[in-house]
Image (spheres, coloured by chain):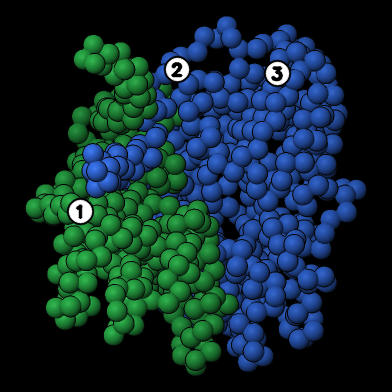
Chain colours: A blue, B green
Amino acid sequence: MNRRDILRRSAAAGLLATPAAGLLAGCASGGGGDKDDATAYKGTKSEQNPLGVKEDAPLEVVIFGGGFGEEYAKAHEAMYTEKYPKAKVKHSVTQEISKTLQPRFVDGTPPDVVNNSGAGQIDFNGLVSQNALADLGELLAAPSLDVPGKTVKDTLLPGAVEVGSYDGKFLVLNYTYTAYGIWYSSKLFTERKWEYAKTWDEHIALCKQIKAAGIAPWTYAGLHPRYMSWPVIATAIKLGGPSVATAIDNLEPNAWKSDSMRAAADAWYQIVKDKYILEGSPGLDHKQSQTAWCQGKAAFISCGSWLESEQKDVTPAGFNMTIAPTPSLGSGDKLPFEAIRGTAGEPFMVPAKARNVAGGLEYFRTMLSLKGAQDFTRKVSSLTVVAGATEGVELPYGLNTVVKALDASGANGFNWVYNNYYRKLERNLVDAACGEFFSGRTSPAEFLEQCQKGADSIAQDTSVKKYKRAA
Amino acid sequence: MRHGKWPLIVTFLVPPVLLYVAFVVSPYLQAFQISTTDWLGYSPEANSVGLANFKALWHDDYVWNALKNNAILLGLVPVLTIVLGLFFATMLAMGGRSGRAGVTGVRGGAFYRTVYFFPQVLSVVIIALLWKEVYHPNKGLLTSALHGLGLPAPTWLGDPSTAFWCVLAVMVWSNVGFYVVLFGAAMSAVPKEIYEAVLLDGASRFTTLRRVTLPLLWDTVQVAWVYLAIFALDGFILVQLMTNGGPNFSTDVIGVRMYDTAFGSETKFGYASAIGVVMFFLTLSVAVLSLRIGRRDRIEYS
């Protein structure tokens, strides 16, 4: 065999090996089968132990290694072992939740607690439709660990349960409370004597002023343009009321082309048309655009309340980032200017086939105790879904503005969940439409058309389970 | 001698074959089976749906869009890489100043050879991140250079009209070095006398390359072609890290589609396996075809 034969043969081997990488998924199926209930850990329920935790049962917790780090989880685990000293807690961190855990779900040996978050998140639609998640209802009914006389449910902020519910069953604990809005630097605005505009016309006038001062009014994550879908939808909801969001979530025909959505898209098109967006933004990812904003190259950015901790390393001292609701379109708006999108985020779940389901629920009860929540807020500067957990905790500047904005919004707060029901619709389809729209390649009508087409394709896909929520 | 053959074969060949069957062949077969189910990946339950996944594939615009991009890659990446690789290898082997006796490479050939090989040493992930910064629309190398010359710069990866070509350029860039070394090694195996004879006959460098070097290197070029064709049908890592198929699906490739369907925005493992099966047959046909079409009489010099 000469050299060329070797090369030729190795080429043939390469031919076989290359696509194999993609087919790796195949290895995972086949095993498993239904697990015997006898292997599940069960303890005796009592007043002290309402969930029936077996005190020496091991607990496995998998945390997403993202912006929050893992220290907060280690603290929660320590609180758990404080109560159950005989329990051994296995802690691990990964950024690739789906790739790491998929084989274990199939095998019927998933961990007991999973922080299903980040870019490698497992699509909840798939998990719920395969009954892979344990019902957390028992947790809600259990008494709170350290708020006397209240059940866990009583201690949660409004909306926390709805977000994690599918067809009325509470399956996903979204632990953080996140506000979505428009961010600006108070320092920059005070220096330049600008004031955040409460109506859209004033906002455009302010943009003009900012641009004249040599700063780009807006920037956005061009490689993840869905960040810009949030203020557009929020503007539409404030104009037309929460039913705008319900229609979108329920995949109603032409929900994306409602009058309110049209008015909102038309309004937002102004910042594209008048070139109020930092040049090059379509080529920036979220971190690059947020950094440009922190460096004062742009005045506004759309983001959730995780922004402050995500930007901790690059934010100049005294930058004083502030969140604000989207401007009102006019006096005809159904919701006041103060209304802001607040929702529970950062999903945690207990797999239905976990061996220690009771331990998983008890771990959630620990997280949702006042002590656990306060510790989280202190460690990662984010709010939790536990009411009153910010008391006695010193909050950083940005988070303080979030708390104030949520207070001001109060009962007028709104939310949408189509991104939880149908991950692909937001992540892929609306995302692509936003990219085209905010880089000026499509008109408002074409933008909404593209979003609607995406929603219709999900609605027609019989392999995707559909969920409805009440208005 | 004949007696001792079988124990040897059994000892040395059976274990690798078993490993190959267990870790390569069986996942393949399993993928074929999964592609006929509606398996959603997070429970052992799956229903057989026959060829429904393939039918859905046929009507899936996003898959067709990805295939179109793969087809362009297939048409351009191998040609560009091989032409550039041959050119550089020729220059390194015999590009030295004309008029001098014998066949020499350009000055500093060893240095160039090392530099060309750099991308091959870097992991693909690093290449992708490196180029993402080069293509940074505000402070990237390219934008800064163009702005320095007073020229306008596009947003590179942020614009559907440029993003695909930006990724394609990185694919060629990251591959050329390996083929420079591969072709260089093959050229050094060509007896020098042949070149000296050609030079004496007064052939130009281009004629030498076309009439002498290329035919003698044909087998190597063909292998390179197959490798690059497979690469072009895949292209997954670079695309996923640089653009994840965007903006507006302009850089989407079939590998990204498959990944996204199973691990990304959905958990449709059955459907993703169907995409994988299609990819398998495409890759197989392309490889077989390019080996067939490229078949020529082999030249032996000894």
Residue on which the image places disc 2? A32
- Residue type at the position of mark 3: Pro
Q: Nearer the viewer, residue B214 or A331?
A: B214
Q: Nearer the viewer, residue B197 or B144?
A: B197
Residue on which the image places disc 3? A58
Please tell me which residue is depicted at 37% across the width and 60% down the height of the picture. B181
Q: Chain of mark 2?
A: A
Residue on which the image places disc 1? B219
Could you give the CA–CA distance between mark 2 and mark 3, rounded to whole angstroms? 21 Å
Tags 3 and 1 on a common chain = no
- Residue type at the position of mark 2: Gly
Q: Quadrant of residue A61?
A: top right
Q: Nearer the viewer, residue A92 or A370?
A: A92
Tags 2 and 3 on a common chain = yes
Q: Is residue A57 above or below residue A282?
A: above
Q: Chain of mark 3?
A: A
Tags 2 and 1 on a common chain = no
**Image spot of residue A42 (x, y percent):** 67, 11
Could you give the CA–CA distance between mark 3 and mark 1, rounded to whole angstroms? 60 Å
Helix, strand or loop for disc 1:
helix
Left or right placement of residue B250 versus residue A95 in this view: left
- Residue at the right extreme? A392
- Residue type at the position of mark 1: Asp
Q: Is residue B230 above or below residue A271?
A: above
